[in-house]
Image (tube, rainbow, N blue to C red):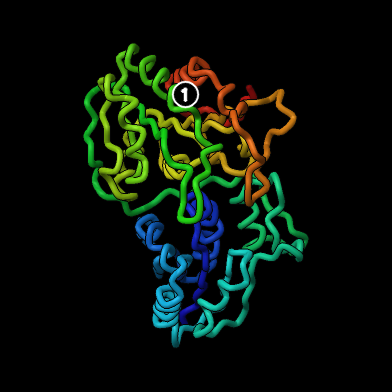
Amino acid sequence: MTHKALIVKIGALGDVASVLPAARKLQQSGLEIDWLCGKTIAPLLACYSWVHPIAVDEELLFGDRKVSALWQIMCAWGALIGSSYDLCAILQYDRRYRILTLPARTRRSIALSSHLRDFKLISERHHSAEYARILCGTPDGYCEENIAPVAPDRLPPNPMQPQGKTRIALAPGGARNTLRDDAQRRWPLNSYYTLAKMLLDKGYEVVLTGGPGDRWVESRFSDLPVENRIAQWPIPQTLAFYQSCDCVITHDTGPLHLAGLVQCGLVGLFGPTAPSKALPRRKGVIGLWGGERLPCRPCYDGRSFATCEWNGCMISIPSQRVAAAVESLLENPGAEWQVICL
């Protein structure tokens, strides 16, 4: 008899990356994993041979057109009808997500809850640890805090072969998803520009990366001899490329979590969000958390940011300090992860 689990997590890259360790534990316990996800995330999950993604179009599902949203629900129902699961885990707070799983027969169902502590993500704990606690934790709620990311086991060839230089990737855009643009998460574009000049001066290869929505950053780097690969690769190829990098530098956005899944140096830049929740917990990772003297840091409560016109916590991270973190990782790529407050 086949034992299966259905995970419902339609979210951003960071959300999905945080659930993967718990999903892996379920799979290792003998459960086959079906995952109801958004179509933008499905290519990431396809990089894991033990996950079967079931994709819906999140833009249509969350859009204003009721007919389109209903069609996406019907598509999910069509994929799940007749299915049986030992566990159905709806890792969303909105109860409306339960509608998507109605045709599936389940022996046990759980869902995130803002009222029940056992099924609520505890603030300040790393999201991977919290999802593992909810899905796989002991009866007393204990779960190890430092849970390493799960590396993909099915990647395409590297789309950009090494050039014989130290390879540094920058991801200066991002911080945007289907529902909103979180500009407060971004390190200033001018700071990325200054950093790129410093890295180029050292003789490093500098590559710009990002998705189709990040092309607005390209013009700022037009006078520098950087490799511009923004919007050129889908998620699997981006993962394969990051794996070839000596270091990836970005703020709290999708590329941070992609780079965290593979073995490369990683410098994550934080301000309004706490690195304790999102920084990948593996070797070769440094988190720089700006705004140590600001009483408003962190200001993200899980749903929204405080009103802020100058983004002081991110501005306070100097390019020179980021460059120093890069050098530290290049000298000791196997160093334990750490967070440095600035």
Residue that appears at 63% across and 43% down: 305
Residue 121 placed where, x, y %?
68, 55
Residue at the disc numbered 1: 329
- Which amino acid type is shown beneath numbered disc 1? Leu
Q: Is 52 left, or right, of 157 in this rendering?
A: right
Asked where in the image residue 161 lies, by quadrant, the reply is top left
Residue 160 placed where, x, y %?
23, 36
Instruction: Tell me if I can see residue 53 in this picture.
Output: no
Residue that appears at 46% across and 51% down: 177
Q: Foreground residue, 143 or 127?
A: 127
Q: How crowded is mark 1: few (under 14 residues within 10 Å), some or many (20 or more)?
A: many
Residue, far bottom: 82
Asked where in the image residue 57 lies, by quadrant, the reply is bottom left
Mark 1: secondary structure: helix
Residue 230 placed where, x, y %?
30, 38
Residue 244 placed where, x, y %?
32, 35
Residue that appears at 29% across and 43% down: 231
Q: Foreground residue, 43 or 27?
A: 43
Vertical position of residue 174 compared to residue 40: above or below: above
